[in-house]
């Protein structure tokens, strides 16, 4: 199991090369308030002075500290004298590969230089990590991340939101679900006010992956101790608390070595009356062993998931690289021609499948909204058909218009029948209104086909902007050429209906049934069985003979004092001449219709509604069929031929298949990422059987 931590360290090195970690690696993240003793705890674990010291914020960039036991076994031999020479302990920085730092004071200076390189000397912070490996026979295999201490008040040139920046950085690292949180708090402060425990509880409310560390236990007021805090009576953590004693400032000034201070720490816990019974679970060495055990078991649990995720990412990159294809700069004309035909075939297949409902879009849009051919079906059913079914046969046609049409059809004589000419004129007028919705439906389908074409762009096609634009241009031109014939077909459907008003249609109500329905309605309205007007139907089924009603007006001497015979009253001087009123420019029927006109109007409306429904039903059936035939199916069957005939030109292949610089960069990035992930997968595969560690 000891090999698990080095494996994760190798993964961290691999991912640090690309500046990001695509998977959440197990690691121990050290958080705490400023001057809580975080750096001293880390130095105690390493056994060397190597971290920057000073006032204010000293740690200003995350430090990923990887500890490697340089002996064959990774257990700390406490019986071995804690004396080390420079030749057996050294450090290496990832940003300076191959260079060994045997002088740990030089490691401190390099950390300061690398920090200042990005953040300057104004106490600013950065979330760019510094990776440091330390090899020593006196350490256990561990991976620790040291973060800047939480501060409250900005100093010097620090930004006013320095507390928020540090907090966000800490949250970013401890939000990794595979991280172990090492919350460092001074024992001589109120544990309930601990910044580290507060942050840890926000991210890990159950405390399942939080370890508490109490520092400065030796500096507590006389007569007080941290036993209740260590035993979890104040704040409970599943993984408990560990108490440590760091070097005092006097020890640092007197150059007391860390390993000597560890001996003093051991004696402090053994001799203290409060901690004597728990001394075996106190101190830096116990903390190191605990962290090593926890991290190894945590890595053991996380490694199968990490392996699966890395494998999935490698497969995704393989697919993306396959879609981007090989660079075309070095291809021959034959290869370029084959590449072009492949791209055209792939696009044409996607276009056809999208209309048939067999294509899955790259962004999964079909899961959230209608896509491709389903949108065309929606236009037919929910827009075109639904709108035409709601059309009233008498829209824009009033009863007065019908009366006027009947009068005009009669000419100068009073007709004995309902004139068939008036019915045909009105029917054609209303049928003509169906043409415009049909034309609009063609335009809507044209827009949808253009939309489908734009959504069928593949990753392969996006590599070549010139080819992509030309493909869409050719497809749009082909679709636009289909619009004219399709609209002409729609217009011809209307012209066919206008050419012959078929009153013998089996679904047409006819004159007899129209009159019968009118009589039934009149009887229901009047509530009597009075004799109805004498009605006769002509041979055509729509010619109706109505009993001549009483004259609407009569001219008599008593009515208006005029004698149209030309005779004059001898004693009336006003009867010398007769003048007619001025003829109006526009003539309309009388405002109040007669009974005869009401009956004629109702019969015409009944006939008109019946015939309009017949035509509308035919139109609703034939318009979608015409559009599918002349536009949709034509586009599906001919898109590939149109593209090949328009684009396959040997002298244009190089221009059409010229990649953009960002595609080349993207391919290079994907290749680099795949190489790194493949290396990471090889590292993970060094552990063959995870069950052996359980």
Image: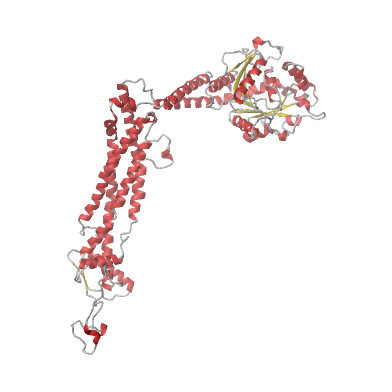
Task: State which quadrant residue 119 falls in.
Answer: top right
**Image height of 678 relative to 478, above or below:** above
Colouring style: secondary structure
Query: In this image, 264 relative to 394: left or right?
Result: right
Residue 304 rendering spot, x and y as whole percentages: 53, 25
Q: Which residue is drawn at 80% across and 21% down?
A: 271
Check the picture and name the quadrant holding the C terminus: top right
Identify which residue is drawn at 35% across, 37% down. 453
Question: Which image quarter holds the N terminus?
Answer: top right
Q: Where is residue 54 in the image (x, y as percent from the top left)?
A: 71, 23
The answer to whether residue 349 of the structure is visible from this angle is no
Query: Quick check: 488 above or below 211?
Result: below
Q: Nearer the viewer, residue 577 or 361?
A: 577
Residue nearest the viewer, comparing 193 with 331? 331
Which residue is pictured at 22% across the width and 61% down the height?
Answer: 424
| Quadrant assignment, res 53 | top right
Residue 395, image x and y in percent?
32, 60
**In the shown orientation, is residue 645 left or right of residue 104?**
left
Up-down: is 569 above or below 419? below
Q: Tally the marks.
A: 0
Q: Point out the residue furthest to the bottom here.
A: 571
Q: In which quarter of the image is residue 654?
A: top left
Where does the image place residue 171, in percent across and percent down from the top left?
61, 32
Residue 529 shows in the view: yes
Identify which residue, 41 or 26, lies in the foreground: 41
Residue visible at 18% across and 63% down in the picture: 540
In the image: residue 194, left or right of residue 420? right
């Amino acid at each position: 199991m000891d090999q698990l931590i080095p494996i994760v360290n190798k993964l961290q090195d691999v991912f640090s090369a690309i500046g990001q970690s695509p998977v959440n690696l197990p690691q121990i993240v050290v958080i705490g308030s400023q001057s809580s003793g975080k750096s001293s705890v880390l130095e105690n674990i390493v056994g060397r002075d190597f971290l920057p010291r000073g006032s204010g914020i000293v740690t200003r960039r995350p430090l990923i500290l990887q500890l490697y036991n340089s002996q064959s076994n990774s257990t700390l031999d406490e019986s071995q004298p804690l004396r080390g020479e420079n030749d057996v302990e050294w450090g290496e920085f990832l940003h300076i590969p191959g260079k060994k730092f045997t002088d740990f004071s030089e490691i401190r200076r390099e950390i300061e230089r690398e920090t200042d390189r990005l953040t300057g000397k104004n106490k600013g912070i950065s979330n760019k990590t510094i990776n440091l490996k330390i090899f020593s026979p006196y350490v256990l295999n561990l991976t620790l991340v040291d973060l800047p201490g939480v501060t409250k008040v900005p100093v010097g040139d620090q930004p006013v939101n320095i507390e928020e920046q540090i907090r966000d950085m800490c949250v970013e690292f401890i939000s990794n679900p595979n991280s172990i949180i090492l919350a460092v708090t001074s024992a001589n402060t109120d544990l309930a006010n601990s910044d580290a425990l507060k942050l840890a509880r926000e991210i890990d409310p159950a405390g399942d992956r939080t370890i508490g560390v109490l520092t400065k236990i030796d500096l507590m007021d006389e007569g007080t101790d941290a036993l209740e805090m260590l035993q979890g009576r104040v704040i409970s953590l599943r993984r408990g608390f560990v108490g440590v004693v760091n070097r005092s400032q006097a020890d640092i000034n007197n150059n007391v070595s860390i390993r000597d201070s560890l001996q003093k720490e051991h004696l402090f816990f053994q001799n203290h009356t409060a901690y004597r019974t728990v001394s075996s679970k106190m101190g830096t060495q116990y903390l190191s062993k605990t962290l090593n055990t926890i991290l190894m078991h945590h890595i053991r649990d996380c490694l199968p998931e990490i392996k699966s995720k890395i494998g999935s990412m490698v497969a995704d990159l393989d697919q993306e690289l396959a879609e981007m294809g090989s660079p075309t700069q070095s291809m021959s004309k034959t290869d370029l021609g084959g590449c072009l035909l492949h791209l055209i075939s792939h696009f044409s297949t996607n276009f056809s499948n999208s209309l048939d409902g067999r294509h899955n879009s790259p962004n999964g849009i079909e899961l959230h909204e209608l896509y491709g051919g389903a949108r065309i079906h929606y236009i037919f059913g929910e827009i075109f058909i639904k709108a035409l079914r709601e059309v009233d046969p008498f829209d824009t046609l009033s009863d007065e218009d019908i009366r006027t049409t009947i009068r005009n059809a009669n000419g100068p004589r009073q007709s004995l029948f309902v004139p068939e000419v008036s019915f045909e004129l009105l029917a054609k007028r209303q049928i003509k209104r169906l043409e415009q919705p049909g034309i609009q439906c063609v335009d809507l389908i044209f827009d949808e086909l253009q939309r489908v074409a734009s959504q069928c762009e593949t990753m392969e096609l996006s590599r070549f902007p010139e080819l992509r634009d030309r493909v869409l241009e050719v497809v749009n031109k082909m679709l636009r050429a289909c619009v004219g014939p399709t609209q002409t077909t729609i217009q011809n459907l209307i012209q066919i209906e206008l050419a012959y008003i078929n009153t013998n249609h089996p679904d047409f109500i006819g004159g007899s049934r129209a009159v019968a329905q009118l009589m039934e309605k009149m009887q229901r309205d009047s509530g009597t069985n009075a004799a109805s007007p004498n009605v006769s139907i002509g041979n055509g089924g729509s010619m109706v003979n109505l009993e001549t009603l009483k004259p609407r007006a009569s001219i008599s001497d008593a009515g208006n004092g005029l004698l149209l015979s030309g005779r004059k009253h001898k004693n009336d001087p006003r009867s010398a001449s007769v003048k007619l009123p001025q003829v109006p420019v526009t003539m309309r029927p009388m405002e109040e219709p007669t009974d005869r006109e009401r009956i004629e109007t109702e019969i015409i409306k009944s006939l008109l509604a019946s015939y309009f429904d017949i035509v509308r039903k035919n139109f609703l059936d034939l318009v979608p069929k015409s559009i599918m035939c002349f536009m949709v199916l034509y586009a599906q069957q001919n898109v590939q031929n149109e593209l090949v005939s328009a684009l396959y030109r040997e002298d244009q292949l190089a221009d059409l298949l010229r990649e953009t610089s960002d595609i080349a960069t993207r391919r290079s990035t994907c290749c680099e990422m795949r190489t790194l992930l493949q290396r990471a997968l090889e590292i993970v595969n060094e552990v063959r059987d995870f069950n052996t560690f359980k």
